[in-house]
Image: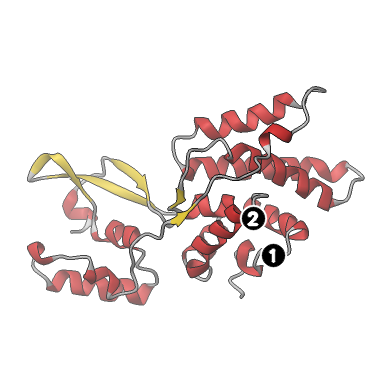
Amino acid sequence: MTATSLGKPLGFIPSPYGTSIAVYGDRDDENSWVHDIEGCMDMAGVYGAANRAACRAAFKARAGNSITFDIFTDHGGRKVPKVALPRPRQPVYPTLPRGCDMDIPIENWITLALECSNWTTRADALIDICHSNLTHADGFTLPPEIHAIALQILLTATVEHMPDEEIDCIEAAAIYAFTNHAEWSRAGVKWLAPFNKTWFRDWVAKRPKYRTFAAAVRLVDPDLPAWIDGGGNA
């Protein structure tokens, strides 16, 4: 199935690996939807030009009614990882200072995150606000480590309001990796690790603001791997 043969997309949905997947109407069933081969490979995590070319060839070689998931796993694909996200024993949010106008930014961050319907938009919104705060902090005399700690605390308090019980996409993993809760940070890194030289590196390359924030957080969290800023190094 090619995009040309399927016509105009009805819309797009996020893949687990940071790409957008086109959704098409099924010509044989008006109540069903389908993806083209490119979208299927994205959803299945088939990465790299060589793997994708081989997967396309294998797809064409099979009859339409014999397509099974192994066509993707045979070319580097996999089922979407799911990493458990236990609730923290000691939430940050109740401990945050109140008064002196502190309630306003705290609740604004939380509202911003809750108003996003998915992690694709939520992660970008949180990255933007973290980067904005880092940029405005350039004029202060406090060490950059202090700014990073403050933003990490606010970020943690914000995502404590999310109902997630597991991580199942690159955007959620990228944010949870920077939280103060060690179990959440480990979960985020665990999800990202298999993709640190592939999907995640591509995702970060398109988000210089994330790289800036990652560098700041690594100043105060040495347990984070060097590749978390998208460099792809072990």
Compared with residue 38, is residue 124 higher up or lower down, i.e. above or below?
above
Residue positioned 58% across, 28% down in the render = 111
Label 1 SS: loop
Image marks 2 and 1: residues in contact by CB distance under 8 Å: yes
Q: Position of residue 46 (x, y in %)?
A: 35, 67
On the image, numbered disc 1 is attached to which residue? 223
Say left or right for 63 vs 74.
left
* Rendered view: 233 above or below 100: below
Could you say which is closer to the camera, residue 54 or residue 161?
A: 161
Q: Position of residue 178 (x, y in %)?
A: 64, 52
- Viewed as shown, does residue 171 lie left or right of 133? left
Specify the amino acid type for callout 2.
Answer: Ala
Residue to which mark 2 is pinned: 182
Q: Residue furthest front?
A: 89
Quadrant of the drawing holding the N terminus:
bottom left
Q: Kindly indicate the quadrant of the structure image that contains residue 117.
A: top left
Task: Quadrant for residue 124, please give it.
Answer: top right
Whole-angstrom CA distance, mark 2 to mark 1, is 10 Å
Of residues 61 and 100, the one nearer the viewer is 100
Residue 197 position in % (x across, y down): 52, 71
Q: Which mark is residue 177?
A: none
Q: For numbered disc 2, what is the local secondary structure?
A: helix
Badge 1 amino acid = Asp
| Residue at image coords 62%, 68% | 227
